[in-house]
């Protein structure tokens, strides 16, 4: 087994490093099809009622057993390999530094986000525990077994952080608390801190406070869409999904109050139809509030309502990735940058030599996320190949080498871009 998948995304103009960008009119999701009654809410799995036993590897042509959080959690393929629960190797990566856990239920996530492999509209096609998410499978594992493995050798653990990803489900608030307690009862959260990737739709500010009181270190909100219109189109009414932009901001601002500076943030996906300026304006707003942005490159997830659309052209992605790093970590403000008539970054607001030093350092092009133990700007959450195939890496899950940096410079059009 490998976390490398051979799928490649097209780009807006059909070239490998296209000079197009994913504009709003072109990025219209498909309309979700109606799911037959008998296949809704995980009925197939619940009716069969197969007892869960040990690790469940998805897509092995067996009906998924009845697995539920908090007893069961899913984890990324990279985390399962790092824990020794799955065989395989990751391209150019030794291991992942973040143990990404995902709540799981036969009913699955009740939202329908257009870019997501876990979305509700897939009920007819695939049981929840078998759905791909950010390009990889997510094995299901008893939570007790996860804690056993990590607690057995805490000093030797490769993990710099653990993250609980909530989904949209009536049980997810309570079960996040139970999973967090199961972890902190045996793993010192000072040794491996915990992040919460929240589901604001079902949460109140009191839920945010409770997670902090129980030892969570960082709280993030997956805004994903950079503007209210794009949010509504991809996560709200546009796809019969329950999320609302204002509710996400209510919980994000509650997290700012409760968790404090540098301990909250938001996920943003680039290339779903926002302009570069709109994305970076959001990045600046988060920094001004005292938080961080964690950025992903749009990739058409197989089976999602956007799987027919082009992946983000690499030049668009690199410009936003670099500009985001400058705003988040180098003290540059969006007002110092210039943009063209399409909202594309034309200049980064730094003298050429300073910009060159940041590009050469390479960290700007690594996966962004909650920090690990190496550097504040190096994410523990490296999500190997979660937003691109290894043949055309968007977020580098390792330090880019000289060859990688040459490719990145080409993608950025460095001779053209001057401040
Ligand atoms: S709420 Fe999260 S897990 Fe559920 S469909 Fe939306 S992005 Fe996917």
Image (cartoon, helix red, strand yellow):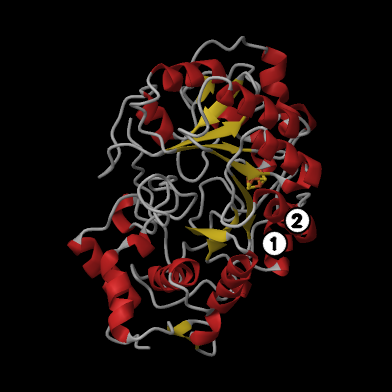
Q: Residue 183, located in which quarter of the rendered image? A: top right
The picture places residue 126, in percent across and down from the top left corner, at: 59, 32
Q: Quadrant of the N terminus?
A: top left
Point 43% across, 18% down: residue? 149
Q: Is residue 177 visible to the viewer in this orientation of the structure? A: yes
Q: Are marks 1 and 2 in contact (CB under 8 Å)?
A: yes
The picture places residue 227, in percent across and down from the top left corner, at: 67, 68
Q: Residue 231, located in which quarter of the rendered image? A: bottom right
Mark 1 or 2, nearer chain start: 1
State the residue position of label 1.
231
Q: Residues within 10 Å of mark 2 (few under 14, many from 20)?
A: many
Question: Alpha-carbon distance for marks 1 and 2?
Answer: 6 Å
Point 76% across, 39% down: residue? 207
Q: Residue 184, located in which quarter of the rendered image? A: top right
The picture places residue 286, in percent across and down from the top left corner, at: 61, 65
Q: Is residue 106 visible to the viewer in this orientation of the structure? A: no
Q: Quadrant of the C terminus?
A: bottom left
Point 33% across, 26% down: residue? 156
State the residue position of label 2.
236
Point 57% across, 65% down: residue? 272
> Looking at the image, is 328 positioned above or below residue 393?
below
Query: SS for tag 1?
Result: helix
The picture places residue 215, in percent across and down from the top left corner, at: 62, 34
Q: Is residue 365 left or right of residue 53?
A: left
> Looking at the image, is 157 positioned above or below residue 374?
above
Quadrant position of ligand 1: top right
Query: SS for tag 2?
Result: loop
Q: Residues within 10 Å of mark 1 (few under 14, many from 20)?
A: many
Between 401 and 185, the one nearer to me in the picture? 185
Picture disc at residue 248? none
């Amino acid at each position: 087994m490998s976390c490398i998948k051979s799928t490649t995304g097209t780009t807006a103009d059909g070239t490998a490093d296209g000079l197009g960008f994913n504009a709003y009119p072109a990025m219209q999701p498909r309309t979700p099809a109606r799911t037959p009654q008998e296949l809704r809410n995980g009925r197939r799995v619940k009716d069969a009622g197969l007892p869960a036993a040990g690790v469940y590897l998805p897509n092995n042509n067996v009906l998924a057993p009845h697995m539920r959080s908090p007893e069961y959690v899913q984890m990324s393929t990279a985390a399962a390999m790092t824990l020794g629960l799955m065989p395989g190797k990751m391209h150019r990566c030794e291991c992942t530094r973040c143990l990404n856990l995902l709540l799981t239920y036969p009913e699955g996530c009740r939202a329908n986000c257009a870019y997501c492999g876990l979305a509700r509209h897939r009920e007819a096609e695939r049981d929840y525990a078998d759905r791909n998410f950010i390009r990889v499978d997510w094995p299901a594992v008893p939570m007790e077994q996860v804690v056993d493995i990590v607690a057995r050798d805490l000093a030797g653990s490769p993990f710099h952080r653990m993250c609980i990803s909530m989904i949209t489900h009536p049980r997810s608030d309570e079960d996040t608390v139970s999973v967090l307690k199961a972890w902190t009862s045996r793993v010192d959260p000072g040794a491996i801190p915990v992040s919460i990737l929240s589901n604001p739709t079902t949460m109140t500010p009191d839920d945010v406070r409770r997670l902090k009181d129980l030892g969570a270190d960082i709280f993030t909100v997956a805004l994903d869409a950079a503007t209210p219109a794009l949010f509504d189109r991809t996560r709200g009414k546009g796809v019969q999904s329950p999320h609302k932009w204002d509710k996400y901001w209510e919980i994000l601002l509650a997290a700012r109050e409760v968790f404090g500076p540098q301990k909250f943030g938001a996920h943003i996906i680039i290339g779903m139809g926002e302009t570069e300026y709109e994305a970076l304006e959001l990045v600046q707003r988060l920094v001004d509030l005292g938080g961080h942005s964690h950025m992903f490159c749009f990739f058409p997830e197989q089976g999602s309502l956007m799987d027919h659309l082009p992946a983000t052209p690499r030049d668009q992605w690199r410009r936003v990735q670099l500009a985001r790093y400058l705003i988040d970590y180098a003290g540059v403000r969006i007002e110092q940058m210039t943009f063209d008539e399409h909202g594309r970054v034309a200049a980064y607001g730094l003298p050429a030599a300073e910009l060159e030093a940041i590009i050469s350092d390479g960290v700007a092009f690594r996966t962004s996320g909650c920090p690990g133990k190496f550097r504040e700007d190096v994410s523990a959450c490296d999500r190997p190949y979660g937003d691109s195939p290894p043949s055309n890496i968007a977020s580098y899950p390792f330090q880019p080498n000289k060859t990688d940096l040459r490719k990145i410079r080409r993608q950025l059009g460095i001779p053209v871009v001057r401040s």
